[in-house]
Image: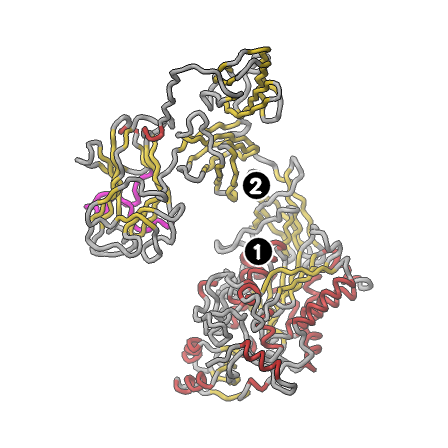
Amino acid sequence: MRMNLSFMFLILMLCCGGLHPVTLWASEPEHMLIKIETTDPEQYQRLWDFNLDLAGDGALRPNEYMEVIVTPEQAAALTRAGYSYSVLIDSLGDITIDSEYDSYDEVVETIQLYENLYPDIFKVYDIGDSWAKVNRPNDNDYLPHDIWAVKISDNVEVEEDEPAVLFCGLHHAREPITVNMVMEILTYLADEYAENEAVQRYVDNSEIWLIPILNPDGHHLVVTDFDVWWRKNVHDNNNNEYIDDYDGVDPNRNYSYSWENGETDPADPVYHGEAPFSEPENQAIRDLCLEQRPVSLITFHTHGELILYPYSSVQYPAPDEDVLTELAYAMAAINGYQPQQGYELYPTHGDLTDWAYSQLGTLSYTVEMCNQFIPPGSEIQSWIDESFPITTYFMDRALRSKLELHVTDAETGDPVVAEVEVAEIELPETFAPRVTDAQFGRYDRLLSPGDYTVTVSAFGYADTTFTVTIHEDVPTPVDLPLRPLGRGSLEGWVFNVAGGDFPFIEAVTVVLHHPEMTPDTLYAEIGYFEVEHMVAGEYLLEAFASGFDSVQDTVTITAGETLYVEYWVVPVFDFEADDGDFGTETRSEWEWGVPLPSGGPTHAYSGSMCWGIDLDDRYDPNRNSYLYTPEYNMTSDGSGRFGIAFYHWYSTVEGWDGGNVQISVDNGETWTILHPVGGYPDASVVALGGRPGFTGDSNGWRRDYFDLLPYAFQRIMIRFRFSSTNRMLWGWFIDNFAIYGSELYVDVEPQLTTVTTPSQFELYQNVPNPFNPNTTIRYDLPRVANVTLSIYDLAGRLIRQWYQPLQSSGSYTIPWDGTDQAGQAVQSGMYVYQLHTGDFYQTRKMILIR
């Protein structure tokens, strides 16, 4: 049984000196270092099934030997499986960390000191929190930490138009010399900047980022001798509030590229975590990389004296193999290390280099320092001196033999985010496009000398292709203005069918989709939206407002023109307050309530309630279940259409089980299948008697619309049929049901039977609204007053004005025909009208649609 950590620390505090360092384990785990012969290829492949902890990249020689860290139990299991091995170190627990290794506190103290000494070129950033700080912020047993990064550049406070280079230390806790290595780089750059011309060139022309300790929690376990062979972070996988062999995520297996092929066992030394970027340490470096988009990076590890380049996850060469190998072999010539593709050593999935290269285009390298994980303190500087020269080469290489592209708008000069393709280097589909940055329109790409054909494309601009020659010792700058394509505008309104005289919806979210652009989201007050300078073409428009049906429409923008659209939507039955008066039959599996993950979706589409087939379990086999709506009188509601819409979620045995929608015009005596716009996904579902229906998987909540124009001015009922064979899955769920054309939303104004003097000044909503081009404005006067009624556009310009001196009390109307004071027709849009009488002012808005 493990002792409570707080109790252990209390013992340490109460005892006098001379004790061994306290450990986070109840008893120190026993580990040994062994060497396994792997001359038999079949035995070598089977070794990976043992989840062994490889003692560094230099500890593996395929078909020769493998050096691994094991417990006595694992060693016994290897013997039983027929493997022979020799013991290199019989008790790794006897190894301690020498004081020459930098501690976390020493790192923080040093970088803060240097920030004070060199404020013009040296800036410290807190880029994130460790797992312990996020999840155990008040637990001293875990000693939570910040993750620090340093930026070194002239004008360090400013984000400059320069390439970024990144050096990262300590992914793996038991590789502490990598911290010293990164600290050597940053102190060298700061100390040498004033006098060293080469350093001035690096610092003045690039932004150099350094992360000394990416995994500070794990680092703490190692450098304080809690467990010098700890590899991962301290993620408490089994939630027992102790750190044990089941805990931790390997930070260099938690990146998203090829993550799905990684190790799923939490006890494995290279466990990849619950999801890509599940760990805060990985999120911190991810966010920094996405912001800075480094042109190149080195992540330091131990051990093996290797320089590894992508891919690490697959065997075939990377698209940029020429320049990747050029840099790798150049660095190897400096420090004598072995350059090779990462996969040639052994496959790794979810590591930094493959992710940064595939998603950002960063030329990424793993430098495996030393010939052991933790060299004696007396050897640290010699190992650093051996590899330090490759870092200056690396910074120098980022400034030459490259394409240095700037893309701008030919008319405005503004930077443009554009996709850049090099014809000679074809990228696979799993790679993210190579793009210019948003702030400067800049794109840096290291290339081997030669001629290249480059195509630059951006949404809304004409594609441009050019040929460029890359030279060995200098960058090749290219300034490229892109010609904008034709632009148009979109103006629209979303109205509430049930809104009466004031049909505006207070808040509407409008989203525009186009295959070549990121969705554009607008927030429309009182249902009005306007988009200028839209690239001509076809867009999918979606509009959402809480409590209302959504809009899905295709709009076509024409260059030089404004497209005016209006949408009338109805309130939905969201089934929160009640069941919508829907009904079921005996033995029906339709239920109203909160869906549970054990029965289907994890949540309703909106709110918490919906209708569904067996809310908390799988549907039963060989059943027919019907859900009925009330009877609706289709008399037209002013929306201009007749139909139903709803959101639904389904997961059934595809082709066998499913549901469809039916309609009755004779109070349920007979039923006819309704077809959604676009049709059902399957024309013949077995359980539906070979009729069409929804079957398979909806892949989340989806909206479908059914046109009911053939049933206009009739009384109708709708039913949802779900049928199953002898199979069982999750079923069908309905939410946010909307009906268009029903008398539910017809507003009947009360008739006035008496005439009275108004009790107060009042300006009413114009009727109709929206209008084209005539409308009527009404106001009340409780007493005689000088009356001014004015109409303004949204820019505040006066459009039309009426003045009536000494008007008697009563109710009055003024018609407006959509013209200005000169009798000229005004354009479509929103207008403000105001009543002014003495010290009384009241303002309303109206919309003219031509």
Q: Quadrant of residue 680?
A: top left
Residue 338 appears in the figure:
no
Of 593 and 436, which appears nearest the observer?
593
Q: Residues within 10 Å of mark 1 (few under 14, many from 20)?
A: many
Find the residue positioned furthest to the right: 195
Q: Is residue 446 above or below residue 454?
A: below
Q: SS class of the residue under badge 2?
A: loop
Find the residue positioned furthest to the left: 669
Label 2 sits on what residue type? Answer: Asp
Q: Which residues are drawn in magenta? A: 677-700
Residue in view at x 30 percent, y 31 percent: 708
Q: CA distance from mark 2 to mark 1?
A: 22 Å
Is residue 121 toward the left or the right of residue 244 in the image? Answer: right
Q: SS class of the residue under badge 1?
A: helix
In the image, residue 213 lies at what x, y percent?
63, 68
* Magenta-span inclusion, residue 385: no
Label 1 sits on what residue type? Answer: Leu
Q: Quadrant of residue 92?
A: bottom right
Give the label on residue 360, or none: 1
Q: How many marks?
A: 2
Give the label on residue 533, or none: none
In the image, residue 782 lies at what x, y percent?
52, 17
Is residue 603 toward the left or the right of residue 429 in the image? Answer: left
In the image, residue 846 lies at what x, y percent?
51, 24
Residue in view at x 21 percent, y 55 percent: 621
Q: Residues within 10 Å of mark 2 (few under 14, many from 20)?
A: some
Of 206 and 342, which appears nearest the observer?
206
In the image, residue 698 lies at what x, y percent?
35, 49
**Mark 2, residue position:** 463
> In terms of sequence position, does the residue under pointer 2 or pointer 1 come before the other?
1
Of 582 and 558, which appears nearest the observer?
582
* Magenta-span inclusion, residue 683: yes
